Amino acid sequence: MILYRGNTYGDEYRDELLAQLPAVIGKTLEKSLSRETVLAAVERLLEKLAEEAAFADYFRQYRDLLSRKTLEDKLETELGADPGSTRRRAPLGVLLHVASGNMDVLPAYSVLEGLLTGNINILKMPHNDESSIYLLQQLTQIEPQLQDYIYAFDISSSDVRSLKKLEKVADAIVVWGSDEAVTAIRKLASANTKIIEWGHKISFAYLSGDYYHQDSELAQLAEHLLKVRGRLCSGCQVIYLDSEDAGEPARFANYLAGIFERVNEQESDPGVLAERSLRRYCSEMKKEMKSLPYVVCDGYVLIPSGDDALEINEDGVLIRNLPRERIVEVLWPHKSHLQTAGLLCGEEDREELIERLIRAKVTRITPVGQMSDYFPGEAHDGQYALQRYTRIVDVPNKE
Amino acid sequence: MKYRRQLFSIKKIFRPGSDGLFVAAVRENVRWHEENNPVYRKILQMKGFTADMLEKIEDLGQLPFIPTMYFKGNDLNTLKKRIGIYTIRTSGTSGTSSAVNCESSALICLLKMAVSTCRQHKLFSLKPVHYVILGYKPDKENKAVAARTALAASLLAPARSRDYVIRNIDGRLEADWEGITAKIRKYSEDGKPVRLIGFPALGYFLMEKLEEKGCKDLLPKGSKMLLGGGWKQYWRQQVDREEFYRQAQEVLGLEKKDIVEFFSAGEHPILYVACPHHHYHIPVYSRVLARDVRTLQPLEKGKKGLLNFITPLMKGAPIVSVVTDDLGSVNDNCPCGNPQPYFEVLGRVGINEIRTCALEAEELAKEER
C-alpha cells in the first residue's frame, strides 16, 4: 500500500509514483509548513479518534503523547527559543523515515516529528502497517495542506532500487531499528545523505538493597513486563540484582512470581486474564517439553540464570546477578545499545548507582515501574529528535 | 477411523443422542495422535492423560487442549505435508500464522458436514441468484481462508451473476461502492433473488451507502445475506448488531430469518450457523465448553470464559481439542426452539495485536470510503 498526496494506491503503482516524486517534492519545497497547521491537525485527529468508541480505547494510551500541550512542550524543550535575528532554524527538507514494526504508532509519530519541524516526510513502512497509513491519511484529510508533506511506501528492505530512488530525494534518512537495518541504510546512502539513527536499544532493571520489601514497586515492574512484553526499546529484558549469592536469582524469581500472582488477582478484565492464562499454559507446555528452568507466572516467564550478560530471551525476562562494582565492566560493551535502566534501591545508594549506570552509557534512568512511560520533553536515546531534523542558517543582520 | 466416518455421516446435524458415538470418535482420534505424534504424546503425558480415560461425555473437559496460540509458531502436525494433504492456513498476525495439515479423508468429512449443515439451514437453492460478495476475489496472492470461504458459499445456489465489493482494479484492491450499489439497484428491478455473502462490516458499509441514496426495501423476495467473520473483533468500529438488522430490514427488505451468520476457525473448521437469536447451536460433529479465564478449568453452562472446541475431525493435526482467542459462553434452552446447546461469542482475548482477515477487509473498506 502506498499513501501519496492523500490517496492510497496499490504497490504496483510504485514505479510510476516514484518517478513523479522528485518533481512533486521540488514544488512543495517552495512552500513552507507552519507548526500551527500541524498542531491543529493533530488536535483534530485526536478528537476524531476519540469519537470512535473502539478506536478511542486503543488510542487512549497515546492521547497524552499526542496532545497539543505535550507537543508544544516538546517543541519548546527541544528547539528552545528563536535562534536570534541573524540565525534562522530551517527544516532539513526531506526526511526518509525507515521505521521498525515493533510499536504501532511509532512510524506515524516519527513522521509527526518531521512535520513539526516543517519537513517533507517519506515513510518506508514496516510491512502491513495499516495503522500508520490510516493515521497519516486521516491527517491529510483533516488538513489537506499536509498532503504534500506525507508519503508512505510499503517497500521491502531488499528492494534496493526503489529505496535508492527515495534516498535520492531525501536530505536525511531517519532509521529506526536493528543494527542490521542501520547497517543496510548506511550501505545504501550516498556520502552526502545525513543518517539519523534511532537504533534498537536494550533496557533492564537494576535492583539493589532490600528489594524484597518493595512490593508496590515490584508490582509496578510486573505490570510493566505484562504490558510491554519487551516489545519496546525501553522494555525490561533483564532484571539485575546487586548480589553475589548464586542462589539469589532463583530465590528472587520465586518471590516475584508471588507478586505476579497478586497483580493478576487484582485484574478484572476477562480478556486480559484469558490472555495471561493462555500464555501461562503455553509457557508451561514449552517448559515441560524442553525441560527449561523457567518460573512460569500468569502471563509472563521469569528466567533465573547464573550468567551476568545483557541478553534478550524471547520467552520472558532474565533474572541475573550483577554486583554494583561490575556494572560498568559488564554493560559498557553494549554502550551503543543501552537505553533505559529501571532503578530500585535504597536512598543512600541512589547517587552512586545512578553514576555507575551513566558511566556504563545508559541514556535514561527511571523508577522500575515506569521504564516505558513517556516523559514530556524527553529525548530519544539521549538526543532531541527535533533538533536533529532542523538546521541553523546564518542570515545577514537587518540594517 | 470408523467412528469418525459414522459421526460425519450423520445428516441430521442436531440429532440428539450422539454422545456415545462422539466420545468413541474422540477416543479413536486422541489415540491416533498419541501413537503417531510424539509432541502430542508428550502433552498428554504432561497432563497425565491417556485416550483410555475418555469414557463418557463428561470426560471431554479433562482432555488436554491446545491453544490456537500454541499452534502459531510450533509445527504440531501429525501428518507431514505431502500429496493428498491440504494445508489450512489461518491469516497470521505479524508473521505468526499457523498451518493445519488436513488429510483427504478429513476433507471428505468436512464436505459431508458442509452439505448437511447447509441443507439443515436451507441454504441450497435451485433458483439462480445474483451473488454479491462482501469481500474480495481470491486469487494467487490472496489465499486467506476467508476469501475462499466466501467463494465456496457462493456455490450453494446457481449463480446468475457474481460481483465483488472489493475488486482488483489494475492490480489495486478497491472497494467499488458506486458500481455495486448500481448493480444492486438493477437486480432489484429484475426481481431475481440476491445473495450477499461475506464480512459484516462490508455489509454495513454497503447498506450505509444505499441508505444515503434513499434506497428502501431493495431486494427481491428469496434474497439472503450470509455473514462470517464475527462481530466483536473490530478494532476501529464495532458494528452494532441491532442497527445492522434494522438497516437490513429498511434498506434491503431482509428480515431476520434472511440473514445467516456463520462461525468457523482454521484450527477448528466445523461450520456453525447462527439461529435467529444469534446463537451458534452445536451440531453432532463437535462439542464446545467454556473455560474459566483464570484457572482454565471447564465452566458450568451459562458462565463466560474461553471457548474450547472439540472435534474428532482430523488425523493430520491434533486439533481435537483447541482453545481459540474467543470469549463466550455455552448455554441450553434457546428460545428458537432448537433443543441442542449453543455458544455465543462475547469477545476476544485482550491482545491488541490480534488481527483477523475480517479486520483487514474492514480497513480496506474504510480507506476506500
Image: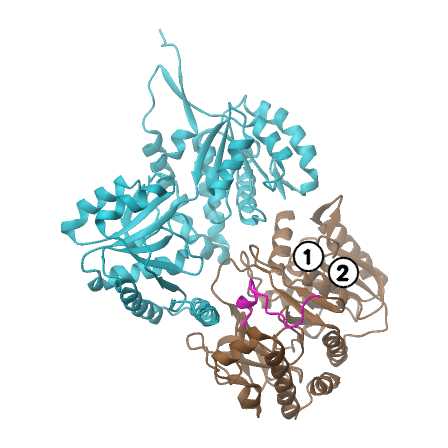
Chain colours: A cyan, B brown
Q: Is residue B333 above or below residue B151?
A: below
Residue A26 in picture, x, y percent from top left: 59, 23
Q: Is residue B78 magenta?
A: yes
The chain identifier of the residue carrying mark 1 reads: B
Tell me what residue is drawn at x 60 percent, y 38 percent: A6
Judge depth for marks 2 and 1 and give the one in front: 2
Label 1 neighbour load within 10 Å: few <14, some 14-19, many 20+: many
Label 2 neighbour load within 10 Å: few <14, some 14-19, many 20+: many
Q: What mark, if any, has residue B136 been given in the picture?
A: none
SS of the residue under disc 1? helix
A398 and B283: which is toward the camera = B283
Task: Classify residue A166 as left or right of residue A235.
Answer: right
Residue B314 in picture, x, y percent from top left: 67, 76
Dots 2 and 1: beta carbons under 8 Å?
A: yes
Q: Is residue A127 above or below residue B41?
A: above
Q: Is residue A284 above or below residue B189?
A: below
Stretch in magenta: B67-81
Q: Is residue B63 magenta?
A: no
Give how far apart the Cα atoms at labels 2 and 1 are: 11 Å
**Label 1 belongs to which residue?**
B206
> Image quadrant for the N terminus of chain B?
bottom right
The chain identifier of the residue carrying mark 2 reads: B
**Label 2 belongs to which residue?**
B132
Tell me what residue is drawn at x 46 percent, y 55 percent: A58
Task: Classify residue B87 as left or right of residue B292.
Answer: right
Residue B349 in picture, x, y percent from top left: 49, 67
Q: Residue A71 falls in which quadrant of the image?
A: top left
Q: Magenta-highlighted stretch: main secondary structure?
A: loop
